[in-house]
Image (tube, helix red, strand yellow):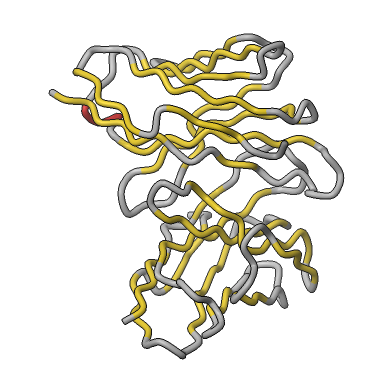
Amino acid sequence: DGGITQSPKYLFRKEGQNVTLSCEQNLNHDAMYWYRQDPGQGLRLIYYSQIVNDFQKGDIAEGYSVSREKKESFPLTVTSAQKNPTAFYLCASKEQGWTGELFFGEGSRLTVL
Amino acid sequence: QQQVKQSPQSLIVQKGGISIINCAYENTAFDYFPWYQQFPGKGPALLIAIRPDVSEKKEGRFTISFNKSAKQFSLHIMDSQPGDSATYFCAASGDPGGSQGNLIFGKGTKLSVKP
C-alpha cells in the first residue's frame, strides 16, 4: 500500500539533545512537507521540499533542520536551539502544483523531559 | 493576507443535526479550498475540496459552500453522526508566486457529535 511512514510515533528527549524524525513516502511525490501541530494553533509549516536536494523554510523553521537526499525521504531534526519542541509533528507529501491532495503520515509526538 | 480564519474553535452538535464550520480568506489569488478531517492521534486526511468556479460541492453528507465575493467558504455536515467527531481544518492555496502554492491552514474546529 502506498503512503507515508513516520517514525518513531512517540519520542522523549532531554533538554539539549537533538532528535531526528523520519519520514518516508512511496507515493512517488516530488513535494514533501513538515508541519508542527499544537492545540489551537492549527498546522504550521516548518520546512518543505519541491525536489531532491532542495528545500525551503516555512513559517517556523527556527530550531529545525532538514535534508532531502532521496525523493522518498525527508527527515526532520529538532535541534537544541528549538525553545519549545514538545509538539505533534506531521510529515506530508503531494504532487507538484498548488492543487491536489496533501497526504499525511500518522505523526510523531515529541515530548521534552 | 496569507491567513485563513476559521470559526468556531469548537462545536457540539446533537446526532442528526447539522454541523457548520466557516472560513474566511483575504488573498484573492487563492483558488483551491480543501477541507481536512483529523481523528485524534492520526494525520489529517482530505475530506472534500472546491475550486471557485462553482458555488457548492456536495459529497455524501458533506457540502462545501463557496462565496467568492465575500471571500468565505464553509463546510456543512448533514445528519451529523458520532463518528464525525474529529477536528476539521479548512485550507487555501493558489499560485501566488513566492510561496510556491503551499496550503495555508485554518486553526481547526473540534467537532463533537453527541449521541
Residue B89, above or below B113: below
For the point 63% across and 28% down, the residue is: B33
Q: Work out which quarter of the rendered image holds the N terminus of chain B and state it.
A: top right
Q: Work out which quarter of the rendered image holds the C terminus of chain B and state it.
A: top left
* Outermost right residue: B97
Give the percent coordinates (x, y) of residue B36.
49, 36
* Outermost bottom residue: A16
Residue B71, above or below B111: above
Count up the numbered dots.
Answer: 0
Q: Quadrant of residue A111?
A: bottom left
For the point 64% across and 38% down, the residue is: B3
Looking at the image, residue A59 sits to the left or right of residue A17; the answer is right
**A91 and A13: which one is in front?**
A13
Q: Quadrant of residue B65?
A: top right
Looking at the image, residue A59 sits to the left or right of residue A44; the answer is right
For the point 77% across and 43% down, the residue is: A97
**B13 and B8: which one is in front?**
B8
Looking at the image, residue A12 sits to the left or right of residue B106; the answer is left
Looking at the image, residue A57 sits to the left or right of residue B80; the answer is right
**B106 and A22: which one is in front?**
B106
Give the percent coordinates (x, y) of residue A105.
48, 57
Give the percent coordinates (x, y) of residue A70.
70, 74
For the point 64% across and 67% down, the residue is: A61
* Outermost left residue: B115
Give the percent coordinates (x, y) of residue B44.
45, 45
